[in-house]
Image: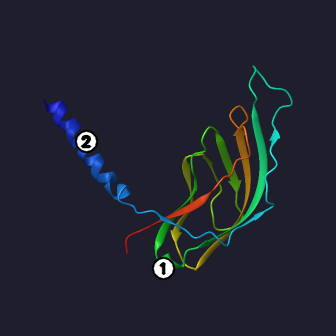
Amino acid sequence: MLQRSALLLCLALLALCFAPLAHAQAYLVDDSASVVLGSDVRMRWDEAAPRNGRAGWLTGYVTVLVRLDVRAWRGRNARIYQVLPPQPGADVVAEWTSHGVLLPGRLRAGERALVYAGPITSDELSDTFRITLRADGEYLGRTESLDFSFEIEPESP
């Protein structure tokens, strides 16, 4: 009985620790000023011949001038995430380097990755992402459109 009570107490404490995280409100960040250099990403096979009867992976590269309008959250601390919605039927992985205030990272379709944490001190956050895209060729049957977006979770004032 004592062991069960201790377990319930631990679970209750864990729930309290993560309660602030569960209440974080995410807002879409206006990234309409961002520019993709080149309109299409040319994907190339990683291997010339498939292995084990599978098509293999395709890899492509794109550079994006990221411009995030964060004026609504100026003066607050926040976390900003890059988001890649699920891609029906395709396993897609994006990995990027950055050259400014945003963090480099990696995410799969259906995930989001932290790109900034800290004070918002200006109206815009700018950076250049060099993105490597990888897709499973086994399930990629047509031209895909990837709609990356950014979400912000400001701290309470």
Residue 8, picture quadrant: top left
The residue located at (41%, 63%) in the rendering is: 25
Asked if disc 1 and disc 2 are in contact, CB closer than 8 Å, the reply is no
Earlier sequence position, callout 1 versus callout 2: 2
Task: Please state which of residues 31 and 95 is positioned toward the viewer in this rendering.
Answer: 31
The residue indicated by pointer 2 is 10
Binning the other alpha carbons within 10 Å of mark 1 as few (below 14), some (14 to 19) or many (20 upward) gives few
Residue 115, picture quadrant: bottom right
List the single residue furthest toward the left: 1
The residue indicated by pointer 1 is 75
The residue located at (49%, 76%) in the rendering is: 73
Provide residue 132's location: percent of width, then percent of height.
74, 49
Question: As drawn, is 125 to the left or to the right of 53?
Answer: left
Provide residue 112's location: percent of width, then percent of height.
55, 52
Question: As drawn, is 109 to the left or to the right of 24?
Answer: right
Provide residue 101's location: percent of width, then percent of height.
64, 68
Quadrant in the picture for the C terminus: bottom left
The residue located at (60%, 41%) in the rendering is: 88
Question: As drawn, is 87 to the left or to the right of 97?
Answer: left
Front: mark 1 or 2: 1
The residue located at (57%, 62%) in the rendering is: 150
Circle number at residue 131: none
Q: Amino acid at mark 2?
A: Cys
Quadrant in the picture for the N terminus: top left
